[in-house]
Amino acid sequence: MWRFFLFLVLILTVAAVCFAFQIIFTSDLHESLVKNGMGPYGLVDYLSNTDRSRVLVLDSGDIFDSKLQLPFLGDNRESVLRYIQKVNYDAMVLGNHEYYFSHEWLEIYKRINKSLIGANVQDLEPFHIFEIDGMKIAVIGLTTIQHLANQIEHAQNLPSDPLEALKKTLRILPKMDYIICLNHLPHEIDIKILELFPEVNLVLSGHDHRGPELKKIKEGYLFEAASHAESVYLLDVNPTQRVVTYRQLGLMTDYVIQNDNTGMLLLIGTIVGILSLLWVLF
């Protein structure tokens, strides 16, 4: 009899391990890809040496930051886009800072970044489905309607109510083994999601910069990020045991952000040229 129980414990232990997976999570980077030789750009090398078959790489928005679009004031968008491509995120959502730029730019970004999802955002898929060891995992994207800049320019394309969008999405979602909400939402709405939708197992959120903070709400977990270069995390998820843990990733990198300062150099050159000419003539 004891052999039977030993075998049963062994099977359950193996099952628990098999159904575990990891999440690498970033949020609210605000174009801060490196600070003092460390930062999210280190994910490029880290992931190149990582087996991603049991790992989801996710971002909760505000990866961009600049409120001004003039190139001579330092435009980091191209550097951030290169970073996104190199990391090859599995899923990302828009933050309110992505609406700080023009409608034309945002539409181009939505087209070229196939990782973007948004159940309450026009022209984006509401979710992505992943399969790990036969387990089906849904990642649903939700974006805030709070603190959006350029609202006049984006007036016809602003995000809709996230709770209503989530309700509609869950109705059409196929049967899943695990459901993640990837949010850029205020803290109180993150909590409401876990209180109102027991189908949701894990909420990963940014926007409020209140983390890192992990807490259990009813049967689900809420993890909220901090911000900028330190906001990189590794979460261990065990759906069988209903356990989620995390640790912050401190990643070394020698990357230096290359600003597009061509316009600035031209402006400075023009001003110096005009002043030199005035000095000679007068």
Image (cartoon, rainbow, N blue to C red):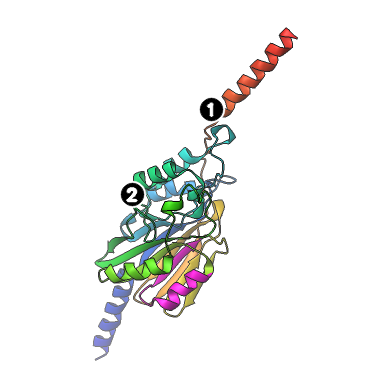
Residue 181 in sight from this viewpoint: yes
Q: Earlier in the sequence, mark 2 or mark 1?
A: 2
Residue 200, how many percent across, how many down?
Answer: 38, 72
Q: Which residues are drawn in magenta?
A: 188-206
Against 40, residue 259 (above or below) is above
Residue 18 sits inside the magenta stretch = no
Q: Which mark is residue 33?
A: none
Which of the image's four quarters has the N terminus?
A: bottom left
Task: Using residue 25 as the reference point, say whether residue 213 is left or right of it.
Answer: right
Residue 86, how many percent across, how many down?
Answer: 39, 44
Q: Residues within 10 Å of mark 1 (few under 14, many from 20)?
A: few
Q: Residue furthest right?
A: 282
- Check disc 2 and give the amino acid type: Lys
Total residue callouts:
2
Task: Using residue 55 as the reference point, say whether residue 4 is left or right of it.
Answer: left
Which of the image's four quarters has the C terminus?
A: top right
Against 82, residue 40 (above or below) is below
Q: Residue at label 2?
A: 114
Q: Which mark is residue 262?
A: 1
Residue 121, how many percent across, how many down?
Answer: 39, 57
Residue at 44% across, 45% down: 103
Q: Secondary structure at mark 2?
A: loop
Residue at 42% across, 79% down: 219
